Image (cartoon, grey):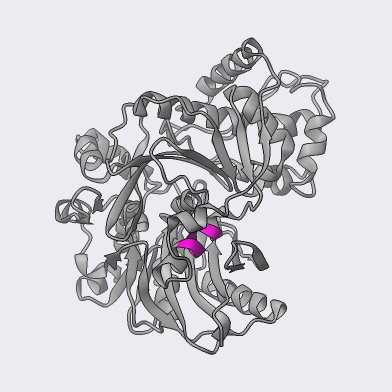
Amino acid sequence: MEKKYVLSLDQGTTSSRAIIFTRDGNIQGVAQKEFRQYYPNPGWVEHDAEEIWASQTEVASAVLRDVGIRAAEVACMGITNQRETTVIWDRQTGKPVCHAIVWQDRRTSGFCDELNRQGYGEKIYSKTGLIIDSYFSGTKIKWILDQVPGARQRAEAGELAFGTIDSWLLWNFTKGAVHVTDVTNASRTMLYNIHTMQWDQELLKLLGIPASILPEVRSSSEIYGSTRQFGDEIPVSGIAGDQQAATFGQCCLQPGMVKNTYGTGCFILANTGSKAVRSGNKLLSTVAWQVNGETTYALEGSIFVAGAIVQWLRDGLGIIKSSAETEGLARSVPDNGGVYLVPALTGLGTPHWDPHARGMMIGLTRGTTAAHICRAALEAIAFQTYDVLKAMEEDAGIRVSELRVDGGAAANDFLMQFQSDILQRPVVRPKVLETTAMGAAYLAGLAVGFWKNLDEICRRQESDQRFVPQLSAAGAERLIGRWHEALKRSMKWDLDN
């Protein structure tokens, strides 16, 4: 039977999705399912890894069924995933020893502060390209080994396995035969040396993590194994963390090209080519991908709360019923009414790296409405992006000519226009917004010859809309100045806790 499709699994922070792509890069079908978020303590965020696995297989089966495609028609499968989220499971039973600790989780902030006080910041950055922060997997692994009864002893006896979500899915798809991750996910653990491209023994010793629990690290585009989960055998041949996959899917393949994904968080990546650029502005230096034996690096700015602030308006405050309402509400008022919202619900990421910052609204008056708050929330996403992009330009010594965008919130025309206004440069939105899943599909398809080369996939790239600045530079500067005043007030707020 002719292999006409690529199945891409996009395992995100709040939902699992499966998307089928055709050879011309179009979407044939999509299925999605949200799963439960657990908040057992302030600053803690957890997932049930078994629910993630169940939801991911459910949507993959559903999209094949709904579109009427047999597994025999699928050339390969790619996986892209929420990064840093940490799962440790029993190698014999396949059962996790506890809930997965999500990338947003802050429970190890105190330990990270201690590492910084002991002077390990430079050593860890020089090896991993990462700032010491509870965001990354390393301290989450240590917490599980220290806090789950018997976990450390079982790990040292070789009974447990660690993985980010890609490894967890691949393990299950291959029925425990393959324990592998790719270079992009490994580079987010704070345990992987991005220069030697190996797990770093010194860092493993520092965090007390036995090497036996770690997955084998492979490239982003190769056949890792195969699955019969959907009937006929399908090779799994592409893996990349969600932000690297989106960068690849946006065809930001040349140094200096930049994309921003507007998801639960915002993640801005600039391709830096074959060199890992050292940041002076607390940006991360990370592996973008490894294809055909060549490693590409990127500078990354991580904004922890972007789309999540809209979820909070819906689920926490109850002032909207769906995220789609925010655009109309934002447009219903002429400006933000002096309201600024700093969405530091789980601390601040790039370029501040302040785990003790907390969310704040300022400028409220009797005239403030839900519309002003919604507008302030959307504007905050754009302001945070501005801060990261300015730091990125300074580090890389470039001026970004345009910002390529994707992710769910990129569909919001108000946000995209305001982003262009604040940046004072064009914002380009692609025709297919599912660039994360598309990147995983491209990586998988290249490995099995479904697509011949990079030129073939990038010729298919089409833009949907190009937003250009409509606000004066002086107007943008005034808004940015007020944002920075609000930002300062939120920082170090929770330092005593």
Query: Does the magenta-highlighted stretch encompass residue 439?
Result: yes
Give the percent coordinates (x, y) of residue 422: 61, 23
Q: Quadrant of the C terminus?
A: top left
Above-or-below relation of 466 to 471: below
Is residue 346 found left or right of 25 in the rendered image?
A: left
Please name the residue shown 27% across and 59% down the image.
Answer: 293
Q: Which residues are magenta?
A: 438-442
Please name the residue shown 59% across and 46% down the image.
Answer: 406
Residue 323 versus residue 448: which sits nearer the camera?
448
Query: Residue 130 falls in which quadrant of the image?
Result: top left
Q: Quadrant of the N terminus?
A: bottom right
Give the percent coordinates (x, y) of residue 394: 38, 23
Give the percent coordinates (x, y) of residue 308: 61, 45
- Give the main secondary structure of the magenta stretch: helix
Count the marks: 0
Is residue 138 found left or right of 49 in the rendered image?
A: left
Residue at the limit of the structure toward the top, as seen here: 474
Residue 361, can we see it?
no
Is residue 24 found left or right of 259 in the rendered image?
A: right
Residue 481 versus residue 359: which sits nearer the camera?
481
Above-or-below relation of 153 to 312: below
Residue 242, can we see it?
yes
Give the percent coordinates (x, y) of residue 55: 59, 72
Please name the residue shown 44% across and 51% down the image.
Answer: 244
Query: Does the magenta-highlighted stretch encompass residue 36?
Result: no
Please name the residue shown 37% across and 82% down the image.
Answer: 176
Above-or-below relation of 339 to 40: above
Is residue 94 found left or right of 412 in the rendered image?
A: left
